[in-house]
Image (cartoon, rainbow, N blue to C red):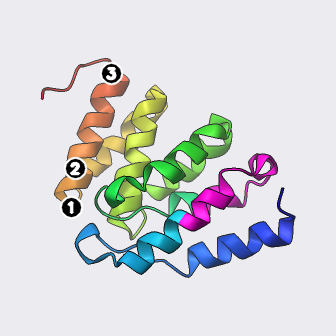
Amino acid sequence: MLQDNQIDTLLTRLKNLFPIPDDEIASREFLTEYEAIFDQLETQPDLLNRLDVVPVLVEAFGNGGGYGLYWLPLHLLEKFDSPQVYPVLIEALQSGSAGSRKWAAYMLGRGRDKSAIPYLELLLGDPETAVRETALQALEMIRGVQPEE
């Protein structure tokens, strides 16, 4: 188990990777470092006691799928209690990072909390297609509508 200062070091390493690049320009070095950080973070049971981690994890998404690596912060965020994460996700819907907006919308959809609807509806006018599509998908999840495939 890592000490708090070691977790702080990992979070600093993660922040140094911001802004997270789009998939098309993510280097192998970036992907390796990103995965190594999350490999260490996910094994820390005390991490869930540190609310300062949540905003960093929410900003750890790029625009795209991250070659599957964006499931790492998503699964970590899901371990936190919803009331801890919800306000950070709502705030992330206004992030300068399209990836953070998209993945925050996705997580809000998975949470199926109807109070997120007005915030997600604002994303339907987002300049990024992926963000608009994910917001629509999240709204469908919350409203119980099966998205068309």
Pointer 3 or 2: first along the chain: 2
Q: Is residue 2 left or right of residue 93?
A: right
In which quarter of the view is residue 135 placed?
top left
In which quarter of the view is residue 97 placed?
bottom left
**Amino acid under label 3?**
Arg
Let me know if residue 47 is in the magenta part.
yes
Residue at the spot 33% in from the left edge and 26% down from the top edge? 141
Rendered-image quadrant of the C terminus: top left
In the rendering, at what x and y percent does residue 86 appear? 57, 42
Question: Which residue position is annotated with label 3?
Answer: 143
Point out the stretch of residues depicted in magenta: 36-56
In the rendering, at what x and y percent does residue 85 appear? 61, 45
Q: Is residue 83 left or right of residue 34?
A: right
Of all residues shown, which one is farthest toward the left?
A: 149
In the rendering, at what x and y percent does residue 122 appear? 31, 48
Residue at the spot 20% in from the left edge and 45% down from the top edge? 133
Rendered image: mark on residue 132: 2
The 10 Å Cα crowd at callout 3, few under 14, some 14 to 19, many 20 or more, is some
Distance from disc 3 to disc 1, alpha carbons, whole Å, reads 23 Å
Q: Is residue 25 left or right of residue 114?
A: left
**Amino acid under label 1?**
Glu
2 above or below 11? above
Rendered image: mark on residue 128: 1
Q: Is residue 9 left or right of residue 29?
A: right
The 10 Å Cα crowd at callout 1, few under 14, some 14 to 19, many 20 or more, is some
Pointer 3 or 1: first along the chain: 1
Q: Mark 1 and 2 residues: CB-CB less than 8 Å, in contact?
A: yes
Distance from disc 1 to disc 2, alpha carbons, whole Å, reads 6 Å
**Amino acid under label 2?**
Arg
